[in-house]
Amino acid sequence: MSRQSGPEPTTIPGSAGSRPARTEPTGARTVNMLEAKTQLSRLVEAIELGEEREVVIARNGRPVARLTSLQPQRRPRRPGVAKGRFVAPDSIDGANAHLADLFERG
């Protein structure tokens, strides 16, 4: 049987002597059922810390479950998205004499 070409397998940190985990085409790491049971705390921690987006759990080499975060993924910030929509005055404190006085006194 020929081996399919694809991404190199990765190994779960701290799992000495275990078989390497596969990486799905979606970028998710695949682990077998036994490895998922023994490494569950580490897998959940990797999800919580954002090191992994999801982990696919396989039984007999067939994907059967997905471990993923309950919190939605945050969209990356886009600097400058509101550029030109607002005009900032030269002196923000100029309209409030008391506030301007506090800043000038230091």
Image (tube, grey):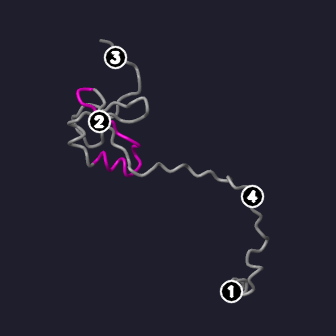
Q: Which residue is mark 4?
A: 85
| 3 or 4: tag closer to the N-terminus | 3
Identity, as a three-letter code, of the amino acid under mark 4: Arg
| 2 or 1: tag closer to the N-terminus | 2
Q: Which residues are magenta?
A: 42-61
Q: Report the quarter where the N terminus lies.
A: top left
Q: Secondary structure at mark 3?
A: loop
Q: Nearer the viewer, mark 3 or mark 4?
A: 4
Instruction: Report the number of numbered marks.
Output: 4
Q: Are marks 1 and 4 in contact (CB under 8 Å)?
A: no
Identity, as a three-letter code, of the amino acid under mark 1: Leu
Mark 4 Cα within 10 Å, few/some/many (few <14, many 20+)?
Answer: few
User: Who's the residue at 38% across and 48% down the image?
Assistant: 69
The answer to which image quadrant residue 23 occupies is top left
Q: Is residue 10 above or below residue 69?
A: above
Mark 3 Cα within 10 Å, few/some/many (few <14, many 20+)?
Answer: few
Q: Are marks 3 and 1 in contact (CB under 8 Å)?
A: no
Q: Which residue is mark 1?
A: 102
| 4 or 2: tag closer to the N-terminus | 2
| 2 or 3: tag closer to the N-terminus | 3
The location of residue 67, given as percent across then percent down, is 33, 42
Q: Are marks 2 and 1 in contact (CB under 8 Å)?
A: no
